[in-house]
Amino acid sequence: MGKKEKRKEKTKQPYAYFGNLLFVCREQWKFRRSYMIAAAATTPMASASAVLAAFLPKVVLDCIERHVSPGELLWKVGLLSLCSVLLAAANNFLTAYCNNSMQIAQNSFWRMQITDKIMDMDYHVFTRKGTRSKREKAMNSLMRNGAPAFIWVNIHLFSALFGFTAFTAIIVRCSFWFIPALIAGYALSVLGWKALQRFRDKLKDEEARIRLRMDYVSQRSKDFAEAKDIRVYEMQPMLDHKAETGLRERVSLLHRIHTGHMFNTLFEDVLMLVTTIGAYAYLIHLKIHTDMPLGDFALYLGAITGFGSWLTRLADAFSESLECAHAVSDYRSFLDIPDERGRTGEPLPAGEDLPCAIEFDHVTFTYEDAEKPTIRDFTLTIRPGEHVAIVGDNGAGKTTLVKLLCGLLPPDSGQIRVAGRDVLTYGRDDYFTLFATVLQSVNFLPATVAKNIALCPEEEIDRDRLWNCMRKANIDEKIASLPDKENTLMVKDIHEGATAFSGGEQQRLLLARALYKDAPILVLDEPTAALDPIAENDLYMQYSTFAAGKTSIYISHRLSSTRFCDRVVLLADGKAAEVGSHEELMRAGGAYAELFRLQSRYYEQEVRAQ
Amino acid sequence: MKKLRENLRIQLRGLRLNQEINGKRYTPFNILAFYLPVLANYVTIHFSGSVITALTEGRSFWDCFRYVLLSAGLVFAIYLVRRLIMRATMDMNWSSWYRREMYMTRKALSLDFAQAENPEISAMLGKAENNSQMYNGLAHQPILIRSAAVNLLSIVTAIGMSSGMLSARGDTTQGGVLQWVNSPLFAALFVLFVLLLLVLSVWGNDAQSKRAFRAHQLFGKMHMVRRYYERRVLNESGSGEDIRIFRERPLIAQELENGIACVSRRAAAINLRADSTFGMIASVVTAIIGGAVYLFVGLKALSGAFGAGKVVEYYGVMTAMITAFSDLAWTLGLLRSNRRFLEEDMAFFDLRGEMQSGSRTLKEIDPDTAEFTFHDVSFRYPGSETYALRHLNLTLRRGEKLAVVGRNGSGKTTMIKLLCRLYDPTEGIVTVNGIDVREFNYSEYLRLFGVVFQDFTLLSFTVAENVAAGEAYDEEKVMRCLDMAGVGERVRRMPKGVRQCVTKLYEEDGEDLSGGESQKIAIARALYKDAPFVILDEPTAALDPKSEAEIYARFDEISGGRTAVYVSHRMSSCRFCERIVVFADGKVVEDGTHESLLAANGAYAQLWNAQAQYYTE
């Protein structure tokens, strides 16, 4: 407990703003240097073109007021226009270049680091509750105004600062008092928005809940997995009504916000008008009573009415930069999640140590938040090359046991030894090479069948071995019948021309995948649930060939599967309640015998159903 | 021309659909709400010119200042109206996603199952969904239409306000350049020059928006791949175990590189090229026109055609007009590109349910004596070339308990789907008491069946809503059915009883259920319906031996006096059924009792022995 708290404290420590800036600069420097130079170069451009735009009317009006020669007007306006054309061109190009770099960086460099971390971090750390929210935050940190935009946002901040300074300098020439007055007015409107934001934040959870519910209803109505039940049971009116309720809830939520919203926008409008009226009054007064040139009148007027936009930009850039810094912290705190398992370790068993022996020695494991351990003081020795069946109720801990064995989860106490060595002493990733598994829930990759079986890049696929394994798994005929054979794409959501496989075919593909890996330990978790009796029997018959020379574990609700295994383990309450061969356990007449009788009752010739 | 008319037709159709989704007021109100600030800007420009004119004429403070007050008053009034309109349309603006989702939900629900399961139609739905998420097609159209209309109005306003600019003449007696400035030729040349530049800008904007659209399409594709990986592969419920055990990291990294990074590089390169050429043209042209306008009005003013006030006014108006022009060009380009998405959306929204519904009611037959017969029925799934059922002949007799067995893909589940009219036969007919089932009212016909499908689903609403399949329910009856299905105790233990939601997806305090418990609730749902036919399709595949035995033991109770059909790979289930039919290659190959079929030593015996050998000594 103490250890956990300490870890929490350490990751809670926020990353400092400048630390984040340095981090992002370093990362970005690795990815594309020219981007940073281009971004820096754009800093003064926005303010420079704004200043030019403010001076242009002054120059024109001055010329007219002084009745200059057409030539003078021509060169003055021409020069200023040329400058603004050049500025516009340069700014346009550099901004386009920076946007391009950001887009690429966001989708390759930044995203890849997160996905790589997801795939690389310890499985038990990955599935921990706290990691989930960190992962989601890290993913979100790449969205708009996220970590990849941090440099750009800082450039914005500086650029707004430049503009603010330049316009202040212009206005101060006319009257200093406009500056505090403008800032005070702006601050008032910001306060209004802040108050509204606070109010909205309070409603945020409700807003998110309504959205999630709406999303649920519409997804379920559209998904064809639910389509049968919805139609046969005529649930359309219910779903329709729920969707309508979602919209109604949304609208009534909006009504709570909109008065505040309207008040704020109106206040802003009034503020703008007051500013304009004030500026005019002062400048008209000045123009009439002093010899201020007409050009200055236009210049000051433009500067005063335009000053607000710089304030807005400055404030926006400031809050954006804070938001970004936050996103960078989210990003870093995910990447900085420490490993708990060692990457390197003892050499893997080879030669005489194969097939491996497996020993569970008083293993206990409790899931986070679980009240009681899922695996409790579990002890079992599996001999080299032995085939073991594990049976037990739904939720007895069979899958957890497999995860413990495969090194995905570390036991809370006790030891698991493979080939005589504690599993934790092997290098984490090396250790995985010992296993070939068929687990229950698998999502195929949106790639070819060949890649989904071999699970390696295209050029490394051994085609002969691939077809050999597909034959063993009894899926070769199906694949050969497809126009693209093993290069057929999977996952219809992504590839329009992809083939959809039935549940039974998917199980066969998974089996082929496990066979392709050809590892010393074979683990099959319910591989026949979707197969018909004859296909199931075929698998049983071939099992000894698949598993020959390997240590294997077979999990199933079909107790018939225990017949081709050397020993059966009945898992109950996280313990090996009964261990022995099928015959031994039947003779012992315990829980296993009871379970077997329950299932076999209907198969026996003389027994009738109740 | 024909292309233009076609494009217009599609845009109008989209507009009508959007009207259905968002209401009739939405588009005109929105255009008005966004035109008003543009108008206010023109008012400000006009009166700032007036103030300067008054100043140059040396008028008094109040003479000048009243223009300011007038302008401020007008602008305030305009903004007030705008806020009121915004308030009236806020519901629509801020809940457009909800409206679209509701509309789409309604559409999807109105489709037949055959359509819902059809891969082509689900691809259509997928496209429409993606468009809604990415703000394409119908979702984008109102914004584009609004922007086009507002910019058009802005241009018209600007032309109206600047009409005096070209015709105004100064002192024609001056010599040199200034005289030439006042000639109509100069004005004509200026107009030509600006028009040329505007054409260039329009062309640049259009070309850029076309490329932006291409990039947008690529990004859309990329996001689809990204979403799939993030939701299905790379999160906690994805394949974290497999990724590690099978060391998929290099492969997935490579796939992501190809599916996301490369695509994004390509899209970004298109954007960069477009922005740095066409975008550049547009922005440079804007700056050049700005200078040209100043020169023109400046020279005119020098010649005495108008005063400094008009210079300020004309410049302001012209700048606003140029911006409106380039925005309009940009918008029109997008409107044209958006057509593709609109067509995708409409392909989905134009779908209509095709299931034939007749006029006969169930009263014509006594449901209690209903007998179903498949007459030489063949069936092919849409888009498939092979038959799932071939010349099937089968009669389901009233009150019997029937087991249906056979290999994967032999047509068992398809037969059930045809029976429940989720599909209609490709050839042959299904009759009930001799009448073609298509002659009955469809939804009335469906009430004959209580089905628990192999891949049944519960919705995350309350237990009672699930059992009653609706929001109105008889609580006592719900409880009775739950008890009969063997899950009544479990539901009573829940904090809110039958009002507890199933899973946490809809309500946060929902209760997660095990596979067996869910299955029992699905059975209760079939019972609640009081249907004369109960069909259980592979209900025990995921259950442990205890739960399986429990379901078997309750089978008689569940089916009561009804006709019951039980489909399963667990051959043990045949023992409590009176009649067994064996499917192979889409037809019935054997029909009889357990004993007679075993004695016949055919397909049934083969299936039976494959499993039973392990259980009998």
Image (cartoon, coloured by chain):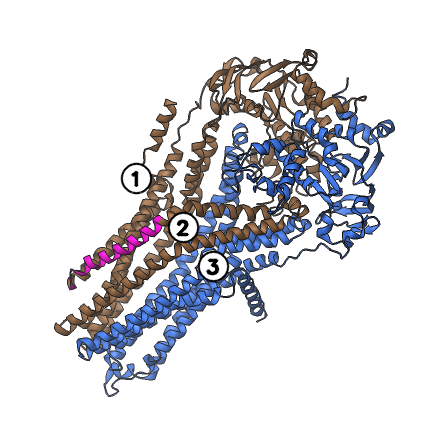
Chain colours: A brown, B blue
Residue type at numbered disc 2 = Asn
The span from disc 3 to disc 2 (Cα, nearest Å) is 34 Å
Task: Name which quarter of the figure residue B564 lies in.
Answer: top right
The residue labelled by disc 1 is A22
Closer to viewer: mark 1 or mark 2: 1
Residues indicated by labels 3 and 1 sit on the same polypeptide chain: no
Is residue B43 depicted above or below B589 in this figure? below
Q: Amino acid at mark 1?
A: Leu
- Per the rendered image, the range of residues in magenta is A174-198
Say what amino acid the circle numbered 3 marks.
Met
Q: CA distance from mark 1 to mark 2?
A: 22 Å
Residue A498 image offset from top left, x and y in percent = 62, 44
* Disc 3 + disc 2, Cβ < 8 Å: no
The image quadrant of residue B157 is bottom left
Question: Residue furthest toward the left?
Answer: A290
Residue A192 part of the magenta-drawn span: yes
Residue A21 appears at what percent x and percent y? 30, 41
Of the two numbered discs 1 and 2 on the same chain, state the one appearing first in sequence: 1
Disc 3 crowd rating (10 Å Cα; few below 14, some 14-19, many 20+) is many
Q: Is there a contact, CB below 8 Å, between mark 1 and mark 2?
A: no
Quadrant holding the N terminus of chain B: bottom right
Residue most toward the bottom?
B173
Please state the chain letter of the residue tagged with numbered disc 2 in the rendered image: A
